[in-house]
Structure formats: structure tokens, C-alpha cells
Image: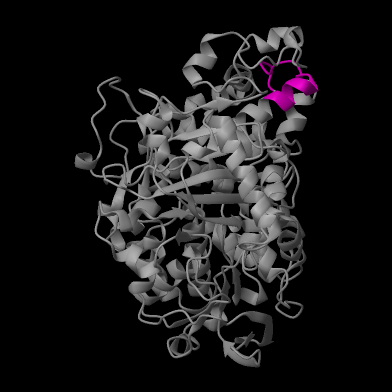
């Protein structure tokens, strides 16, 4: 793989400023590498009249400063009032620019959604450690890792004054259960202490070859990912030049695998793989690993996604690099060099994030205004067509449009005349989203915390149990643990991929026949997982199912790219790079977590909103860019030079 000299220099700078303190992630560097590779290979195809190198192009000189005087009077249109849309509005407001947010649904928040079984306002405003406050579960985003590259998210928590609502999120409790292959439910400690506890080996009637079944799944997964971890190990070198060279070599090796799914990589021969890669796994082993480690069909995602997840979350970080103040971080004396990753949730529900974001906006989102058409009407305006409460069409011109809606929703908006490039239309249609379904059940009490139900020493406070039955993952609340009589709300099932699509097909509305079937299946599964008769659960007070692929305003849970969608080595095109560039000569901007490298995380939404605002300023108010950077920084996955180059290539219609 060939990198431009500018990328090499910028990478060294980024590593010197950020990775030395672990503020940047491998994903951030990978995002910049993909964009740079696309730019570097497209330079030679820029149409006649373009600069010899895109970075030589001044940003839209014809628009500044004459039209700069108009933009303050004409609001910038933001489509969607989720995290990305609200964050873009916060930035624009801070910069003194007007905006208007059009939201299709009757609420703000997008995929940050909290369901309260009691009255919405009563639950939201209830004091801490009172039962009314904890009568909820988070249908959308629910946990926030305290790792350095998530700093922008924790900075947002400070800006909206909810830092004091952060409480520890428990990922694992010693009494969490595993239930596979009809074997008795067991804790991870018990299952690991016995060879082939779940009887998956050929010797015990399964299909997994005996030598594989003698080891835990983590062992075989480690053999897959460790060669790439070793390639990136030199990133801890104190010399930023050496770190940059290590990254270039490691990414070049990893990007060779971008045509593979995780399943395909595990099954394929050793050609083009690192020398220390294991021999291909038997198909039965791959199915076993996917069942124990992931969700049914999730190994069809891009192998590069799996490796980057492993690099981001499986490695410890040096002490002193938490996003939280030291007084909020428990001391850890077990190791002088590293600190254990810590996770947090929002006491009272994640919708505190978006409600407080909205509370800071002078111009509130306009709800129930679905956009049906976006088109470029002249050199300085985009026209947006939206519907009112009665279904009547309204048209309004804006100098810029920022779309923050999921790509599945954007795909059904008429953008034929919006100036989208070919690669952008392909990206909107093709970039893959995963499915997710959550089933929340409210019981009379938290029976999983009751020793008279669970047995002495077997109660569960937080964490999650997993199984190969339809519910797959059961998540116990990490909130309300100090509240006497906290409501018995349980995230009874959390599924992804095919598991989520199958369960989601039964999410046909509260109290329908399909919904009753779904509740019955879920309760039966809970009984099997916990080996407790349903009668001991107590009364089911209420329940709520949400399937994100069935959601009218989402049509998918989060982006999760398939093979080749980042951009394989030596390929001059990249759907990912295309979707990050502006359209319509810099007046139409596509944001949302799918356009960031941080898929499925609030961070991705925030980073994408920042990029969209930057591109607005680049076109219309370049004088505001220094203030943007001063007040809001630069996301680690972006560089000003890269954004300038993408803008120039987009202007010349070569993305």
C-alpha cells in the first residue's frame, strides 16, 4: 500500500500529539489511512482544470467573503434531531450561525431512546435512589466506555452538565450465567474449569473436533487476532516517527484482508495472511466461535471491523488516561502501568443526554416534519421539501443542508437532484447496517437480586448472561442497585444480526398475537437460562419490545460494514471516503455514525456532526474555522488537509 507524504507527516504529528497519551484509537488512524489512500490514488484522475494536487486548492474562494454576510441570516437546515443533529446545532449556535432542525418523528433523540414504564416526566424528574427513577430500560445507547478516544463524548457530558449522572456499568458479575447446548447453566468460572463443559466436541456428540474443544473459545479467537495485535505493538514506541512507520506497515497488512468477512478469514487458507496466522479453522469451529462470542450471522461483517474492535477494546491503556477526573476513578493498585477499562451508564436513562442537549438550544427542533425531497435549486441554495401535520408539502430554501438521518432513511428521500456523486449514492444504498432487538420486561420485583428466588450466594447485580436460545443475551440493570424496592425492569433479551431479525419479526405492536408469542418465548427462555420456574418471577406488569430494523425512522440499528466497504488495499475507490465528502458543490453534507469510523457509538455521531459543520464553514464561513477548532477541537479521525482534499475531489466529481 502506498501512502502520500502528507499522510506520513500528518500521522507522525497525530501520533506525537495524541497517541502518545492514547487519545487516538487505531480506528481513527485507519479512517485517515483509508481517506488518504483514496485521495492519493484519485489525484491522477482529477478532471481537466483542477489543481495538480487537491491540497493546492483554496477552499471555495468565490464564496468568501461576499456570501459570508448572508449565511448568518439564512439558517442551515439540519435533518434529524438525534445525537448528530443536536450536536451540529450546538456547534453552529456556539459559532453564531442560525440553524433549523427538521425531525420526522414526534420525539428527539434518534437511536438514543429510553422507555419508561411509568409516566415519562415523573420517571425522568424523579430524585435519585427513588423507585420512580428506575422504572425504565434503554432501548438505544446504554453504556459508555471510559477509554481515551471517547473523550469527545465525556466532553459533551460536561457541556450539558450530566457528569454527575454517570454511574458504573457492570459488564460482568460473578453469578452471570452461560447456557449452551442444553447443558446446565453455569458461571464462566465453572464452565472454564471443566474441559468441554458444553459438550460440543465430536467425542461428546457435538461437531467441534476434539483438539479445538479442549480449549476455550477465547484461545482460538486470540490466535486469529493476535498476529494483527503484534503488528500494532510497536505503536507504544516513544518515538512518534517509529510509531508512524509501525502503523503504516500494520495497516497495509490489515487492509489486505478487507475483502474478507470474519467468517471468510477464519475459513480461508494462509495466502496473503500474516506469517503467524493459524491454519484455517473447520467450519464447525467457526460456527461454535460465533455462537459463543457473537450473534448468529455477525461473523459476516468485515474482518477489519472485528480486528479494530479487538484493538480498541481488548488492550489496556496506560494509567492517567481516563476521560474522568481522578477523583471519580477508583484506584487500581493491581498494575502500575495499566488501568482496567471502566464503563458507565446514565443514572435515570440515556435520554438525559439528548434532552439536555436540546435544553441548550435556542432554536428547538421542529417535530413531525418528515423531509421527502432535497434538491439543489441554484448555485447558493438547496431546497428542502417536508410535510406538515396534515401531510401537506412545504418548500424552503437553505444555503446548506446537513442530513444526520440513518442511511436507510436518507435512501427513501428524493435526492435525484441533490447533487450526490455516484460513490455517495452507492454508499447510501450499500453500506451495511446491523439489526438489534431489545425486549424489556417489568416484573413486580427484581427477582434476580432476591436470594429467596435465586438461592444464597447466587443473586445477580448487573452484568449479562448469555445463551444459544432465542433471547441470546439477558442484561441485568446496573442502576438502582442502592434503591430499596427498585422496579423489576429487566432487559430480558438483547440480540443482534439474524437473532435480532428473527425476534424482531414478532415485534408487530403491543398485545398483538405475535407480541404475545414473543413474550411467552422470552419468559420460557428466562426460565431455562436461570433454571427457575416462571412462577418465581412474579407477575409480569408490562413489557416493551423494540426492533430497530422495524423502526420507521431508523431502518437499522447501527452501521457495521461488510467486506470491502472500507476500501481494500490498492483500490482507488472507497464508499467510506465518498460518504464523508460534501455533495452539491459543498452545500449538502451527510452525517451520522455510519459516516464515521466509530460505528454504533455516540462518538461516531458527534464526530460526523463536527465534520459536517466544518465543511459548511469551508464553503461559506472559513473565517469561523479557527473558532470551531478552538472550542470543539478536531476529531482524531479527521484532518484539515484530508477534508480539504476530499472537498476538492468532490468538486471535480471523482469520488
Q: Is residue 259 on the magenta stretch?
A: no
3 or 195, which is in the foreground?
A: 195
The N terminus lies in which quarter of the figure?
Answer: top right
Check the image and tell me how it is coloured. one colour
Q: Is residue 18 above or below residue 556?
A: above
Q: Is residue 604 above or below residue 551?
A: above
For image coordinates 38% across by 48% down, the residue present is 345
Residue 544's image quarter? bottom right
Q: Is residue 97 left or right of residue 58?
A: left
Query: Which residue is at the far front?
Result: 535
Indicate whether 109 appears above or below 137. below
**Residue sitting farthest toward the left:** 327
- Residue ID at (45%, 50%): 142
User: Where is residue 10 drawn, in percent x and y?
Assistant: 49, 47
From this view, report whether residue 389 is shown above or below residue 221.
Answer: below
Bounds of the magenta segment? 274-288
Identify the image quadrant of residue 305. Answer: top right
Please state if 189 lies on the left or on the right of 329 as rendered: right
Q: Residue at x 62, y 22 (%)?
A: 221
Q: Position of residue 364 (x, y in %)?
A: 41, 80
Is residue 276 located in the magenta-colored stretch of the structure? yes
- Identify which residue is drawn at 32% across, 58% down: 132
User: Residue 357: horizontal and vertical position, in percent?
Assistant: 37, 68
Q: Is residue 185 visible?
A: yes
Query: Residue 455: percent from the left, percent from the top?
Result: 40, 25
Q: Is residue 245 visible to us here? A: no
Residue 347 vs residue 91, the one in the foreground? 347
Secondary structure mostly seen in magenta is loop
Amino acid at each position: 500500500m502506498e501512502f502520500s507524504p502528507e499522510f506520513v507527516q500528518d500521522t507522525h504529528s497525530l501520533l506525537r500529539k495524541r497517541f502518545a497519551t492514547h487519545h487516538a484509537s487505531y480506528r481513527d488512524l485507519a479512517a485517515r489511512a483509508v481517506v488518504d489512500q483514496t485521495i492519493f490514488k484519485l489525484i491522477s484522475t482529477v478532471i481537466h482544470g483542477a489543481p495538480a494536487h487537491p491540497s493546492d486548492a483554496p477552499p471555495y474562494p468565490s464564496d468568501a467573503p461576499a456570501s459570508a454576510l448572508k449565511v448568518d441570516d439564512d439558517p442551515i437546515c439540519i435533518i434529524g434531531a438525534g445525537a448528530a443533529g443536536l450536536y451540529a446545532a450546538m456547534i453552529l449556535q456556539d459559532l453564531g450561525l442560525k440553524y433549523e432542525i427538521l425531525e420526522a418523528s414526534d420525539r428527539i433523540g434518534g437511536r438514543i431512546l429510553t422507555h419508561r414504564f411509568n409516566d415519562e416526566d415523573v420517571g425522568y424528574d424523579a430524585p435519585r435512589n427513588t423507585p420512580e427513577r428506575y422504572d425504565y430500560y434503554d432501548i438505544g445507547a446504554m453504556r459508555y466506555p471510559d477509554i481515551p478516544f471517547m473523550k469527545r463524548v465525556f466532553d459533551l457530558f460536561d457541556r450539558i452538565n450530566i457528569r454527575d449522572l454517570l454511574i458504573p456499568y457492570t459488564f460482568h458479575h460473578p453469578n452471570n450465567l452461560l447456557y449452551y447446548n442444553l447443558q446446565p447453566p453455569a458461571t464462566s468460572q465453572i464452565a472454564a474449569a471443566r474441559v468441554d463443559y458444553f459438550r460440543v466436541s465430536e467425542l461428546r456428540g457435538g461437531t467441534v473436533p476434539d483438539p479445538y474443544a479442549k480449549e476455550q473459545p477465547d484461545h482460538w479467537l486470540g490466535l486469529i487476532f493476535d498476529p494483527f495485535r503484534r503488528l500494532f505493538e510497536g505503536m507504544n514506541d516513544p518515538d512518534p516517527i517509529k510509531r508512524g512507520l509501525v502503523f503504516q506497515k500494520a495497516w497495509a497488512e490489515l487492509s489486505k484482508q478487507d475483502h474478507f468477512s470474519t467468517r471468510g478469514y477464519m475459513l480461508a487458507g494462509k495466502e496473503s495472511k500474516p506469517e503467524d496466522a493459524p491454519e484455517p479453522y473447520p467450519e464447525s469451529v467457526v460456527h461454535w466461535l460465533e455462537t459463543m462470542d457473537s450473534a448468529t450471522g455477525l461473523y459476516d461483517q468485515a474482518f477489519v471491523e472485528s480486528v479494530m474492535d479487538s484493538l480498541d477494546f481488548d488492550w489496556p491503556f496506560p494509567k492517567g488516561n481516563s476521560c474522568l477526573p481522578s477523583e471519580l476513578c477508583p484506584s487500581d493498585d493491581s498494575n502500575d502501568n495499566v488501568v482496567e477499562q471502566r464503563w458507565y451508564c446514565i443514572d435515570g436513562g440515556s435520554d438525559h443526554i439528548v434532552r439536555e442537549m436540546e435544553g441548550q438550544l435556542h432554536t428547538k427542533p421542529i417535530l413531525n416534519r418528515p423531509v421527502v425531497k432535497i434538491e439543489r435549486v441554484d448555485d447558493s441554495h438547496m431546497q428542502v421539501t417536508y410535510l406538515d401535520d396534515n401531510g401537506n408539502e412545504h418548500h424552503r430554501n437553505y444555503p446548506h443542508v446537513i442530513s444526520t438521518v440513518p442511511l436507510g432513511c436518507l435512501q427513501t428521500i428524493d435526492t435525484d437532484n441533490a447533487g450526490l456523486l455516484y460513490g455517495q449514492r452507492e454508499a447510501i444504498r450499500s453500506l451495511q447496517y446491523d439489526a438489534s432487538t431489545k425486549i424489556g420486561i417489568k416484573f413486580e420485583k427484581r427477582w434476580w437480586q432476591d436470594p429467596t428466588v435465586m438461592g444464597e450466594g447466587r443473586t445477580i447485580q448487573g452484568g449479562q448472561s448469555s445463551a444459544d436460545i432465542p433471547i441470546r443475551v439477558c442484561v441485568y440493570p446496573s442502576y438502582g442497585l442502592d434503591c430499596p424496592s427498585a422496579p423489576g425492569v429487566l432487559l430480558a433479551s438483547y440480540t443482534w444480526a439474524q437473532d435480532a431479525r428473527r425476534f424482531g419479526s414478532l415485534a408487530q405492536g403491543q398485545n398483538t398475537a405475535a407480541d404475545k408469542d414473543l413474550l411467552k418465548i422470552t419468559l420460557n427462555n428466562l426460565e431455562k437460562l436461570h433454571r427457575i420456574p416462571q412462577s418465581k418471577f412474579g407477575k409480569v406488569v408490562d413489557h416493551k419490545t423494540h426492533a430497530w430494523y422495524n423502526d420507521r425512522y431508523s431502518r437499522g440499528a447501527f452501521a457495521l460494514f461488510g467486506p470491502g466497504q472500507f476500501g481494500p488495499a490498492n483500490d482507488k475507490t472507497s464508499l467510506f471516503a465518498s460518504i464523508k465528502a460534501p455533495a452539491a458543490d459543498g452545500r449538502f453534507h451527510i452525517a451520522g455514525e455510519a459516516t464515521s469510523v466509530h460505528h454504533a457509538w455516540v462518538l461516531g455521531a458527534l464526530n460526523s456532526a463536527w465534520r459536517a459543520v466544518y465543511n459548511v464553514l469551508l464553503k461559506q464561513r472559513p473565517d469561523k474555522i479557527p473558532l470551531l477548532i478552538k472550542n470543539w477541537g478536531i476529531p482524531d479521525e479527521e484532518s484539515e488537509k484530508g477534508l480539504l482534499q476530499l472537498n476538492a475531489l468532490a468538486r471535480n466529481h471523482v469520488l
